[in-house]
Image (spheres, coloured by chain):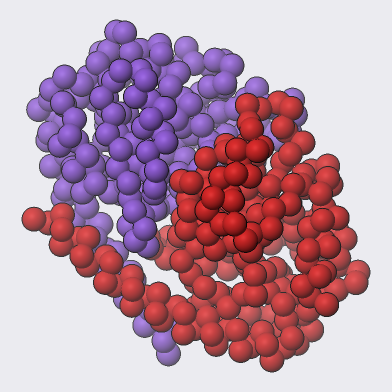
Chain colours: A red, B purple
Amino acid sequence: MPASNVATRTVSVMEGILDANDALAQLNRAKFDAAHTYVVNVMSSPGSGKTNILERTLEVLGASLRIGVLEGDVQTSLDASRLQRFGVPVVQVNTGSELGGGCHLDANMVWCGISQLPLDKIDLLLIENVGNLVCPAGFLLGEDVRVIVASVTEGEDKPLKYPHMFRCADLVLINKIDLLPHIDFDLNVLLKNIGSINSKATKILMSARTGQGLDDWIAWLNARIR
Amino acid sequence: MPASNVATRTVSVMEGILDANDALAQLNRAKFDAAHTYVVNVMSSPGSGKTNILERTLEVLGASLRIGVLEGDVQTSLDASRLQRFGVPVVQVNTGSELGGGCHLDANMVWCGISQLPLDKIDLLLIENVGNLVCPAGFLLGEDVRVIVASVTEGEDKPLKYPHMFRCADLVLINKIDLLPHIDFDLNVLLKNIGSINSKATKILMSARTGQGLDDWIAWLNARIR
């Protein structure tokens, strides 16, 4: 049967790839440690507001902290362009068109990306991963913490349907809460679902659009960096 | 260098997997043809409203057409449960936890799933793919058409950032337009971006929540099935 052959081959190769990825993530980690750079891996569905949150973060923290950004996208440098206006070093990594490689950042891409950044002059490196609630969860990059952005417009059930992603989160930023009056959504159900998958993750309600909750996110970041 | 080894190995194996997938998709296609079943592959980001659209579709078409549903999710059978109340045959396929296999439906999963459906008694099979704007685009399932759901809350730039997905679409359902008054979003920019990636795709504005545009979607489906 061709069916079972395909499945067997996929799994074994992926394990080898993940071993290689983890080894390279440790090399990234050593670079970050040597440069005293704190690294945040930001992950979410497409369109949850990651770039918008980074914009707000740069506005607030850009004057007091030396920040750098690594942007991961399948294609385009639209997000990097949005962030370059803040005058911080930004590197765009395009994950390209290869299946299995295009859907997430891996440690190798980050290794290549940070070679173009002045790490010694960066206190906080914000990594914006490819918008995808499945694949990025499996790939360590060498980061200190993982932040998942969950927009309320995506529904309450996402932690249950994408448990690998939510299980690995240190913080869940629940974004777009300014839209709560306009959608059929039960915030308590989302909070309960996050808790059932990951009882340790911090949860912060915010709207990158209105600025609500931004102080909590900045305080969470500051408490870790300094 | 471990870096280049990883990249080379990933690509070559993925090509083999895609060849095997396409061969199996043709076997699915032969089954669908023999049963006179029209098959729609519905894809989107997580939380764009796919299941909600299927619910509305079953409400409207369930009495006049024999419909079946194949639900793809990484985990849970939440969506299948939502659809079973309509009294149509629903099969849930959980893509599981394996990286490279968990992020999309492939032809093998569909082959297994449809073995549990009475295809001879199904005029229209709706396949709800895993919520993911990257990986599902590469995997033919044997479907007649591909429908991409793009929610306006995800921003205007998604066709440019996820071109593989939008390039393969026969129809783009632009969902959640009831939220347009409450978000910073330029519909003309989204329409232009879709057109720049895929000039042939039909575009329908809708809100599964309010029912706006539902008639257009039903008419589009009906024109193809009958």
Relative to residue B57, is residue A154 depicted above or below? below
Outermost residue on the right side: it is A63
Q: Considering only vertical position in the picture, is B111 above or below B100?
A: above
Using the image as rendered, state which of residue B113 and residue A83 is in the foreground.
B113
- Left or right: residue B36 compared with residue B202: left
Pick whichever, B126 or B139, lies toward us. B126
What residue lies at 72% left-to-right and 88% top-to-bottom? A35
Q: Tell me the residue at 20%/21% (across/down).
A: B122
Residue B19 image point, x, y percent? 21, 57
Q: Position of residue A123 (x, y in %)?
A: 78, 79
In the rendered image, which quarter contains the C terminus of chain B? Answer: top left
Which residue extends farthest top?
B64
Residue shown at 39%/80% (left/top)?
A: A19
Evaluate whether residue B219 shows in this view: no
Q: Quadrant of residue B89?
A: top left
Q: Is residue A57 left or right of residue B169?
A: right
A26 on left or right of B1:
right
* Quarter of the image where one finds residue A148: bottom right
